[in-house]
Image: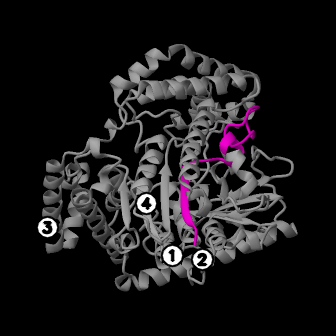
Amino acid sequence: MDNVIVIFVDSVFSDCIGKGRTKVSSTPFVDSLMNNSIFMPNVFSFGPYTNAATKGLFCSAPTLDDYGYYFGINTVKDSHYKIFKDNGYETYSFYYPYYIISNETIKSIDHTVYSGGFVYSAIWRGQFEYYKKIKEHRELTKDEIKLLDKFVCLLFDCWETYYKKIIEEPESRILIDYLIDLNKIEKSLKKLEEEQRKFDLDHNKYIAGILEEEMSHPLADVDCIEREKYADNDFLRKVYSSNRDRFRKIQKVNKWSNILNNRVSGRYVLSSIKSFFETGNKDHLRYFYNIYCCLNAPNKMIKDSLNGVWQEMPSARTQIRKGIEILKKRELTNKPFYMLFHVLDAHERISYFSYDSNDLTLVSEEIKDAEEFASKNKKHFKGNIVYQLSLHYIDACISELFHYLSESGLDKNTTVMIVADHGSSYTYFPIRKNVVNNYHRENYNIPALIWNRNLPKNILNGYYMSSDLYKTLYATCGMKSDYRHIKGIDAMEYPNGRDYVISEYMGPGCPDMLTKEVWLSIRNKEYLLAFKCHLNEQMSISKLVEAYDLKNDPLEMRNIASFINLKDTTVSAMYNIIKERFDEICANRDSFINTIDEIII
C-alpha cells in the first residue's frame, strides 16, 4: 500500500487557485501535479466553518449525522484516523488541541504533533457561552445537561491528554517547543487534575459554576501557552521595515486593480444605508467595511499582525519542514504511513510569509516573490491580493515537500491529497454584506487534488461533496472501504459527479441541535435553494430564505426567494430532497439523544 500525505489547507475557494482569478497562476506547482492526479474543482463542503466542514470531510458522512459536530469527529466510529490505522498504517497528525479529539479517537493516532495551546476562550465562546445565555431566561433541560456533561467529560479528557503528551512525548511539541516551559506545563496539569476532581464530586454543580463564572472560572487560567507569541512583533517590524517598498507595491496593485475591476453594488449600498437608518444598527454598514478591507487588504494584514493575536498556529513552511524532519528520522519499516497537515495561512488572518521564522533572509525572499507575483497580475485582478499571495506561498511550501519526496525516493510509493475544509469570503469578489454566514458558493466550493506519480490525468468537473474525498482517496490507495458509516462515493466510479450537493450546519455559535435552527441548502446547475428550520418544527417550502438562478446570476447577487416559481418541477424536486434530509437529521438526532449514555466518545 502507498504512503499517504494529506495537506489540508484551511479556507480555499476553488476559483482562486490556478489562473481562476489572476493572469499568472497563483499555484504553479500544484498546477504541475495535475498531469498525474485526480482533480476535482467542484467539491462542496457541508458548512463554512472548520468544525462543521471537517466532520463531513474526515468522516465521509453528512455533517449533521450523530449529533453533528457538537463533539467534533468523535461520535463517528470510522474516522479517517481509524480507517488508516485499521488498514495497517502508522498515523501522524498535526493539529491544534482545542480541535477536540478524544482519547478514544487518539488511539488511532500513533504520532500527535500539536500546533498550539489549548485555548479555553475558544471553548467558552463556542459552547459554554450559548448555555449561559439560555440560563438567563430558563433552566436547562435534562437533555441539555446530559449533553453538557458529556462535553465537559470530553474537555477534561482531551485537555489532560494534551498536557501529558507534551510532557512525555517530545515529538508532540516539536512545533511549539519554543513556546513551552515544561515546569509550567506540569503545574497546569496539576491545576487541571484538581479541577477534574471537583467536577467528579458533583457534575451539575461544576457545570453551573462554569456558566456562572464565565471567563473568571479557574479553567480560564489553566493554559500556559500564549497564542500571541507565534509571531514575534520585533521580528515582524524588521520584516516590514526592510521590505517597505515591496509592501507598498503590493498595496498599490491591490487598491488600483480593485478600483478598476471590482464593481461596488449600488443595490447593496442603498439597502445598507436604508437598513442602518431604519434600525440604527451599525452591523448594516458591514458592506462599507468590506469595501475598505478589499481595497486595503495588504496594509490591513500588517496592522492586524502587530495588534494582539494574529496567527493561531505555525506557518505552512514551518509545518512542512517539521514533517520532513519526522520522515527523515522515521525508521525503515514495511509499514506505510499516513500524515495529515493542517495549514492556516489562507484563513481569515491571512498571511503569505513565514511569520514564525527568525530568518530575515528567507522571509525577504518570500516577500520578494510575493511582490513579483502581484506585479505580474496588476490590472488583471479583482479581490483580495493578500489571499492570492497566501495561496502562492502555500504552493511554494508544498513544492518543498515534493522536492523532499523526490529526493528521498518516497514519491515512488506515496499518494498526496491536497484539499480544503471550506471556502472563503475573504477573497472579496464579489464584495458582500455578509462575509461568512451565508450560502454563497465562495464559502463552500473547494478544490481537491489526489496525486500519485502513476495516475493518469483525471479532471472531474462534476459536483461532489466533501464526504466523497476520503472515500476516493481510500480507493486510489487500494484500501478496503466497507465501513458501514462511510456514505461518500468514489469519484472515479462517478466521473460525472452528483446531480446536486447539499450543505448543512447549525449556523454561527454552538452547534446545538435541540433548539437551534438548521441551515440547509441544495445546489444543482440551475438553482441554489436555502432553508432555515428549527429541528422541532416541520420543514415546509415556507422555510425557503434564499434562492438564486445560477444560470442568469452566477455570482448569486439577487435573492429571488420571494418570487421563485415553487411549482417548477426542478424547484419542487429540490425541496423534496431537502425535506427528506431534514427528516433524517431529526430522526438521527433523537436516536442519539436517547442513547447518549451508552455512547463512548
Q: Earlier in the sequence, mark 4 or mark 1?
A: 1
Q: Secondary structure at mark 4?
A: strand
Q: Secondary structure at mark 2?
A: loop
Q: CA distance from mark 3 to mark 4?
A: 32 Å
Q: Which residue type does callout 3 highlight?
A: Lys
Residue 566 in sight in this render: yes
Please state the horizontal and vertical placement of residue 500, each as a whole percent of the image: 76, 66
Given contact means CB atoms under 8 Å apart, are the residues at marks 2 and 1 in contact?
Answer: yes
| Relative to 372, residue 96 above or below | below
Q: Secondary structure at mark 3?
A: helix
Q: Which residue type does callout 1 highlight?
A: Ile
Residue 519 in sight in this render: no
> Residue tagged by mark 1?
83
The answer to which of 545 and 123 lies nearer the viewer is 123
| Relative to 130, residue 174 above or below | above
| Relative to 156, residue 258 above or below | above
> Residue tagged by mark 4?
93
> Residue tagged by mark 2?
479
> Residue tagged by mark 3?
198
Given contact means CB atoms under 8 Å apart, are the residues at marks 4 and 1 in contact?
Answer: no
| Relative to 66, residue 296 above or below | above
User: Viewer-nearest of labels 3 and 2?
Assistant: 2
Q: Earlier in the sequence, mark 3 or mark 1?
A: 1
Q: CA distance from mark 3 to mark 2?
A: 46 Å
- Furthest-top residue in this view: 245
Q: CA distance from mark 4 to mark 1?
A: 14 Å
Q: Which residue type does callout 4 highlight?
A: Ser
Q: Which residues are magenta?
A: 1-29
Please state the horizontal and vertical placement of residue 489, each as a whole percent of the image: 68, 73
Q: Residues within 10 Å of mark 3 (few under 14, many from 20)?
A: few
